[in-house]
Structure formats: C-alpha cells, structure tokens
C-alpha cells in the first residue's frame, strides 16, 4: 500500500482526510512535531506528501523546499489561500498539484490517484480479472461473460464498471466518476457520463445484469452484490 504523509495542523481536517484515505487502502501518517518535519519524513519515507501552506513554525513552502532538496517524491499542496501567487509558488518549488480548500474529497482522491499513476506508472486497478454477479469481468479485454453470453464494452464503459464493482454496494458519486475519467485522460462531461452509463446498462441487459447498476438520485451510482460474493 502507498504511504501518504499529511502535513496538516488542523486536527479535525487531518482525521477526516486520514479516515477517508484509509478507506482507499492508503497508509496515512501525520506530523508529530512541526519543527522536525524532515526527520519524520526520513522515518516515514512516504510515496506522496500532502502539505498545507499555513503551518506552525515554518510554512508549507519551506518544507516543500526542504523535501525537494532531498527527494523527488510527489507533493500536493492543500490550502485555504486562494491567491494565484500561492499556486505559482508551489509549482515553482516543484509541487505536483495544488488543491484549494474547501474541496470535495472525490477531487482529492482523483488527484492523488492521477499523481501516483504518473509518477509510479501505477494503475489503481491492478486486478485484470474480477467476478461480479456470476459474470467474469476481464479488464484487459473489456469484456463481461456469463451463462447468457459475452458483451464487449468501450474503454469508458469498462472504467465506469470497474469503479463501481471495485466499490460494490457503495455509492460512487457522479463527480467522482467524471473526475477520475478526466484524470485517466478520458475527457467526460456530465452529459457524456449519463450516455455512457445508459449504454453500459443496455449492454448488461443482454446478459441479465442491467438492474444491478442502480441510480441513486442526487448522489451517484451503485453496483449491488449479494453478501458473500467476491
């Protein structure tokens, strides 16, 4: 699992981000002493660092400089400051991205995934084969097969299906799907997402699975699975 170092002094926000990222199987480490960030960085050896700008003792720009002097680890700034110079400064110091508070968690996770993919050539869905509702899903071939037959999906349709079944019985928001597809270089608007989901359902209908992709009005979509199924 990837290790993320979260340099954030707002304890409430730190715990919220940590808990959400842990749901995505990331190991999250906070800072115990904001005067010794580099010592803790060396101990943790994180795969990605998220830094707030306004911190006790030294600001996030200082720690970004210090980290960049020793490591090329990806860095994402997370800040309530909205002045354009802050974003320019973070990029000049070698940060990989900048997210302004308040933010949607779906945007944060999508940017983390995109950064990890780019830096480590990491595919967030490493599994090539998955079963769902008695059907075999082959991610590489973009196909689904069960006793009723085989359907071929487009790249976007398979990506949507992957996100849903990897988080089966959980609602995946429309915003998260759009953002993830966008960061995966599949440029999708809200209307395009609707079209792709409808096409996916139509294809699943031919093998009797359309009803198991449910729409949660005002929230997103969910792929249902019976308890005990893998």
Image: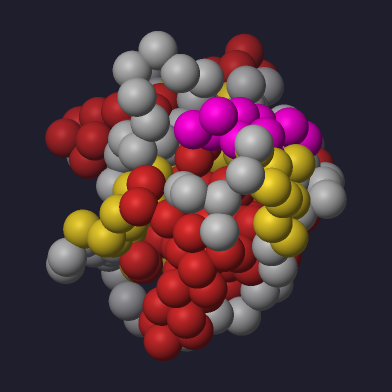
Q: Which residues are magenta?
A: 128-137
**Residue 184, position as x, y percentages in the image:** 66, 64
Colouring mode (rainbow / by chain / secondary structure / one colour): secondary structure
User: On the rendered structure, is 98 left or right of 92?
Assistant: left
Asked if residue 91 shows in the view, the reply is no
**Residue 220, position as x, y percentages in the image:** 28, 60
Image quadrant occupied by the N terminus:
top right
Asked if residue 136 shows in the view, the reply is yes
Which residue occupies 16% across, 35% down?
Answer: 12
Which residue occupies 46% across, 18% down?
Answer: 229
* Dominant SS type (magenta): strand
Callout count: 0
Report which quarter residue 218 is drawn in. Answer: bottom left
Which residue occupies 41% across, 60% down?
Answer: 176
**Residue 154, position as x, y percentages in the image:** 70, 68
Residue closest to the eye, 13 or 92: 13
Q: Is residue 95 magenta?
A: no
Relative to residue 157, is residue 3 depicted above or below?
above
**Residue 133, position as x, y percentages in the image:** 49, 33
User: On the rendered structure, is 83 left or right of 12?
Assistant: right
């Amino acid at each position: 699992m990837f290790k993320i170092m979260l340099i954030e002094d707002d304890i409430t926000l730190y715990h919220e981000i940590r808990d959400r990222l842990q749901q995505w199987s990331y190991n999250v480490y906070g800072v115990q002493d904001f005067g010794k960030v580099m010592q803790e960085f060396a101990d943790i050896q994180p795969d990605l660092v998220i830094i707030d700008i306004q911190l006790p003792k030294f600001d996030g720009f200082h720690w970004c400089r210090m980290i960049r002097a020793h490591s090329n680890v990806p860095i994402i700034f997370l800040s309530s400051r909205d002045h354009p110079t802050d974003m320019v400064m973070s990029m000049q110091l070698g940060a990989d991205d900048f997210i302004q508070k308040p933010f949607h968690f779906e945007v944060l996770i999508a940017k983390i995934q995109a950064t990890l993919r780019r830096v480590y050539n990491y595919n967030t869905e490493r599994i090539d084969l998955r079963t769902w509702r008695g059907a075999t899903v082959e991610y590489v071939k973009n196909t689904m097969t069960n006793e009723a037959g085989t359907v071929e999906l487009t790249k976007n349709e398979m990506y949507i299906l992957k996100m849903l079944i990897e988080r089966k019985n959980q609602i995946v928001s429309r915003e998260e799907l759009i953002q993830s597809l966008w960061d995966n270089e599949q440029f999708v608007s809200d209307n395009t997402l609707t079209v792709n989901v409808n096409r996916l359902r139509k294809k699943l209908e031919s093998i009797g699975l359309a009803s198991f992709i449910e729409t949660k009005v005002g929230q997103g979509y969910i792929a249902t699975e019976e308890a005990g199924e893998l």
